Amino acid sequence: MSLKNLREYIDACFTGIWIETDEPDEAILQVRQLSHEADWTLSVWDIANGFEASEGSETADPLSALELFGTHASHTGTNLLILRNFHRFLGSPELIQQLSHQLTTGKQLRNFVLIVAPVVDIPVELRKQFLVLQHELPNREKLLEIATEIGSQLGELPEGDEQEQLLDAASGLTRQEAEAAFALSLVREGKLSPASLWELKTSQLKQNGLLELHRGQEQFADLGGLGTLKGFCERTLRTRSNNTLAKPKGVLLLGVPGTGKSQFAKALGHETGRPTLQLDIGRLMGSLVGESEKNIRQALSIAEAMSPCVLFIDEIEKGLSGAQSGNAGDSGVSTRLFGYFLTWLNDHQSDVYVIATCNDISRLPPEFSRSERFDGLFFLDLPDRTQREQIWEQYLNVYGLDASQPRPEDQGWTGAEIKSACRLAALLEVSLAEAALHVVPVAQTACEKVTGLQQWASGRCLSAETPGIYQMPSSTKRRRSVPQGDPSLN
């Protein structure tokens, strides 16, 4: 719920309101402006200064602050008390009891308690008495105002696509952070540009450790094949529909390890001018009760604040497989994470394009891949001869190798294995044929799993290479296992 609706909640007599914000001064300013318009009495308290415009030392005590508010508040109007960072004191039984009393009696006296804090940490005794509101980060219009104010000394601002890129880079920053980033950009480059803003965002994400910001230079041209997948994602992201409900959601990529799923996700962000945020579900797991759920809410909130963006979740089955196996070992944490993530996938309206990769879909619950979670479920098969030729040419050029030399037999090789052969040839200064002796394709080491994955995807997934439903190649169906010999001879 948004802070914009605060007046409605006050009129409806919600006496306890918890405002979650990273910008306490800005949130208090908005409440102060609303109080002035509505003719409400407003008091603000914090542990360092006590009540504003008060010289009484006793007001620096949190318990005394609540008692004084209940005693001195006017009985003829609406009275608001803002408590800054009061969650730090709610481990005290006396404070909890006094706050509960104030919230109960406040309905008759129209006394309202507003706690402004960066986290929501409500004691169980008070949870039914508080309404939680989210103080929203500045929107694009507000960010443009800040940029205009900071850049006024230049006499002009970027326009058109440059302005949109600047605002994309600023999305998700607080007002103070945006001001600092714009100012840093002026100092460094003499103009407003996105580079300094992305640097600040990268630093922020490293602090919370939940997401990583990828700003690489991968391109579709560096990724052989996958023509249908490339065209589908690029079109859904670059086409702007007049229907506000027709928004892209993302794709689930199933495939053999090494077929370019992760590289595609990173290249898509670069191709469409969006930052790529990488979410590692393993990092969401916390040791405290409720910490994992809090982490996924925070991670997805950050992604929404930084939209438009690409949210990349690699090997998602490893993080959410507990929801399928009964989660006996994690007390239901995987199930709760999975449930929250599914709900968000289905309901979110933000411009966050999700790319989730998976090597073993049998470890995911079936409801994960149903329609409207993603725009499509694509299967990335082992590259065919044409794709392998493109990949060889690419990596021979990258590593500066002789393109005319004989190549090893590469039937069933993935792009990662071709890259490995080229890298080893350059590293060991040997031919491709010699380097290939050090490469064991996944089609051999995990033959049964690869074949089983192809069989499952056939008729169930979209093909990443050609339009339509993926069909298992007939040559693969006829492929026989390698003879193992007569056990009696061993």
Image (spheres, rainbow, N blue to C red):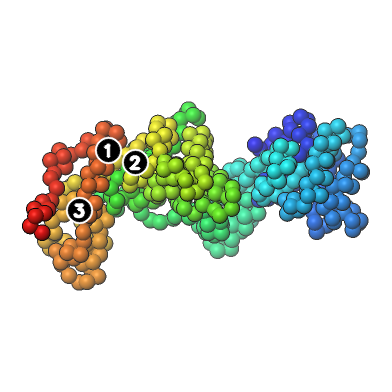
Residue at the farthest front position: 488
Of the numbered discs 1 and 3, the one sitting upstream in the chain is: 3
| SS for callout 1 | helix
* Residue 399 in the image, given as x and y percentages of width and height: 25, 64
Query: Does residue 367 appear to the left or right of 121 in the view shown?
Result: left
Residue denoted by label 2: 362
State if disc 1 and disc 2 touch (CB < 8 Å). yes
Reading the image, the residue beneath label 1 is 456
Mark sitting earlier along the chain (2/1): 2
Residue type at mark 1 is: Trp
Residues 151 and 464: in front is: 464
Work out whether mark 2 precedes mark 3 in sequence or the reverse, and give the earlier one.
Answer: 2
Return the x and y of residue 401 as percentages of the image width and height.
20, 65
Foreground of the two, 407 or 256: 256
Q: CA distance from mark 2 to mark 1?
A: 9 Å
Can residue 2 be seen here? The reply is: yes
The residue at the point 20 percent across, 53 percent down is 444
- Residue picked out by circle 3: 444
> Which percent across, then down, holds residue 11?
78, 30
With 328 as the anchor, is 472 left or right in this view?
A: left
| Quadrant of the rendering where the N terminus is positioned | top right
Q: Is residue 194 above or below residue 243?
A: below
In whole angstroms, how far apart are the C-alphas of marks 1 and 3?
Answer: 19 Å
Q: Farthest top residue?
A: 243
Q: Quadrant of the C terminus?
A: bottom left
User: Residue shown at 59%/47% (left/top)?
Assistant: 290
